[in-house]
Amino acid sequence: MAEPVTEPAQAPAAVRRAEEAMGTVFSFDVRGGDPRAVRTALETAVAGLHRIDAVFSTYREDSQVSRLARGEVTVGECDPEVAEVLELAAEAERVSEGWFSTTYEGRLDPTGIVKGWAVERAARLLAAAGASGVSVNGGGDVQLLGVPGPERPWRVGVSDPLRPGGLAAVVSAAGARELAVATSGTAERGAHIVDPRTRKSAVSDLLAVTVVAPSLTWADCWATAAFARGARDGLAWLESLPDVEALLITAGDEVWCTGGLAGWLG
């Protein structure tokens, strides 16, 4: 799980908000831009999160995804976002060689991609409204756009799964106009990641995988797939992906990193 690191003073005035949705808390930190336009965009972004929850929740019997899973509607009869997410999920499954899946216990379940996609979508909406810096944190997965202040990057702390309250690393977005940090593991939510081969909880030698990439949609998917693959195979696969770096922590308290991760630490 990742947490934003508190910035020192002298940053532009911030618009901040926390909102419960999709079973977690979304935290917004928006800098710069016209305050009225930013607040309007923030209201739209928050409303969008609740609408996405209503469409994609697998806990709601009346959600479009639940109805789609039961065969009561077709993809074409659902909101356009459903087709968009399923297309992205199919691409994630292809790139991950099947280690990312939208099937859980034999039932359609795209929740593994929805949260990251929703966070990134909200962040880009705020940037499009004129904000110069945007940080949206959805349950520990963060999309960063722009900067919080002149010559001052966003920084995100990566929680240490073996030391509650401690940090395993701090990711700096210096030099990047967009950066995402996503973590998958068992420390916060227990065994919830599925091995697509067995359709059961993944048996992994990992405790957590944190992925750093430009897009949270993909960073979230790659962290999940790498965790299911295990440390050695997961690290090798992550190394093969363009513009992706990662930090892997094993149950034996070993820390494995991709070759370029050091460039994002600080």
Image (spheres, rainbow, N blue to C red):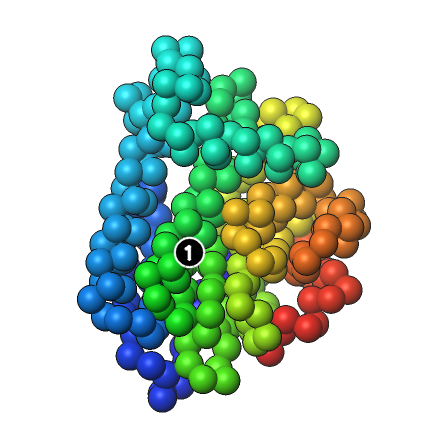
> Is the residue 26 above or below the residue 151 in the image?
above
Quadrant of residue 16 within the rendered picture: bottom left
Place of residue 180 in the rendered image (x, y in percent of width and height, measured from the top left): 53, 59
Position of 137 with respect to 163 (left or right) is left
User: Looking at the picture, which amino acid does disc 1 mark?
Assistant: Arg
- Residue at x 68%, y 73% (from the top left corner): 263
Place of residue 68 in the rendered image (x, y in percent of width and height, measured from the top left): 41, 18
Place of residue 67 in the rendered image (x, y in percent of width and height, measured from the top left): 36, 17
- Residue at x 50%, y 77% (from the top left corner): 153
Place of residue 223 in the rendered image (x, y in percent of width and height, measured from the top left): 61, 48
Indicate the secondary structure of the residue bearing disc 1.
helix
- Residue at x 29%, y 79% (from the top left corner): 13
Mark 1 burial class by Cα count in 10 Å: few <14, some 14-19, many 20+: some
For disc 1, the marked residue is: 124
Position of 148 with respect to 173 (left or right) is left
> Is the residue 64 above or below the residue 232 in the image?
above
- Residue at x 68%, y 58% (from the top left corner): 243
Residue 74 appears in view: yes
